[in-house]
Amino acid sequence: MLSRILRMLPIFPGKYRISKKLLKQSTLDQKNILINGKWGCSFLIPNLKENIGFEYFVNGVYEEETIKEIESLLPNNGVLLDIGANIGTIAIPICKRNPSITCFCIEASPFVFEYLQKNIEFNKLENIAAFNLAIHQENDQYLPFTTPKEKFGKGSYSTAFAGKTQDIRTITIDRLVNDLIKKRPDLIKVDVEGFEFLAFAGGKELLKKEDAPVIYFEFVDWAEIKNAKLLPGQAQQLLLDFGYQLFIVQDKKLIQIMIPLKEGSCNILAIKENNQNLLRSFFKLTS
């Protein structure tokens, strides 16, 4: 009952802090919770300690604005490549709301991948395929991947968060597109906890093209520094070198950046010049 009341409230500063105080500890300690959320989506959530799970429990949706922004940039019958799909809280609502979309989800963590598969099945979606692979700049390496079960959204090549380590086979974006999915994506969403540079470096054949896909990714300064041991902004610079234009996605607005951001965190839209017409779709969404 309380969760229904919380979902009726808009997102406001302090909503999650207040929600945690109102909820019983027994609720917060639950694991493997099946939650029926917005748009007829159902999700099996590992726990409510991770932000993904807690936000879905409170709002019935995770990162609703991100979902709508990505939707606005996808054509009907478009192809979405979701790298770092986690349990599917972005890809599944998009595919449920627009069945013409085809989505390929990539999730490296075997633990998280099981939930992703179950959530695709729960939602009876036939327009999503999921692969348990790790995106990298090299193919066929078996690299240790850490999955902290309580913080299941923080899985990465890094050991910054405690968790079980498993060797996962790597694949580049170029091989993934050319040999596995065999479809050119219209949009690539990337969320790999600071290792975006490695993902983009393995996609230079695709991403250097004039008609390269739109990319929607997250920049977090500490993740690039602490997790990936890279310079902050290194992934952005690589995309600029590939001929992309970069825009900060902030408060339903796009702000072009000419040099890489070095501090803070935000979502970034990368787009080639000959694809600028898609920006009108974004502005139409946010106007």
Image (cartoon, rainbow, N blue to C red):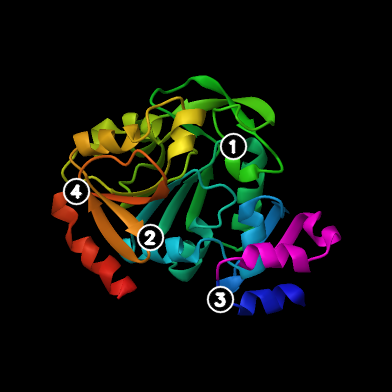
Distance from disc 3 to disc 2, alpha carbons, whole Å, reads 21 Å
Q: Can residue 122 be seen in this view?
A: no
Label whose residue precedes the other's in the sequence (3 or 2): 3
Q: Which residue range is magenta in the image?
A: 12-35
If you read the primary sequence from the N terminus, does the residue marked by circle 2 or circle 1 appear first?
2
- Separation of marks 1 and 4 at Cα, in angstroms: 30 Å
- Label 3 sits on a secondary structure element that is loop
Mark nearest the camera among 3 and 1 is 3
Mark 3, Cα crowd under 10 Å, few <14 / some 14-19 / many 20+, is: few
The mark that comes first in sequence, 3 or 1, is: 3
- Please report whichever mark, 1 or 4, sits nearer to the chain's N-terminal start: 1
Q: Which callout, 4 or 3, points to the residue nearer the camera?
A: 3
Which disc, if any, is residue 155?
Answer: 1
Which label number is shown at residue 272?
A: 4
Q: On the picture, is 158 further left or further right than 285?
A: right
User: What kind of element bears circle 4?
Assistant: loop
Q: Which amino acid does label 4 sit on?
A: Lys
Closer to the camera, 151 or 43? Answer: 151
Marker disc for residue 10: 3
| Label pair 1/4, CB-CB below 8 angstroms | no
Q: Is residue 15 magenta?
A: yes
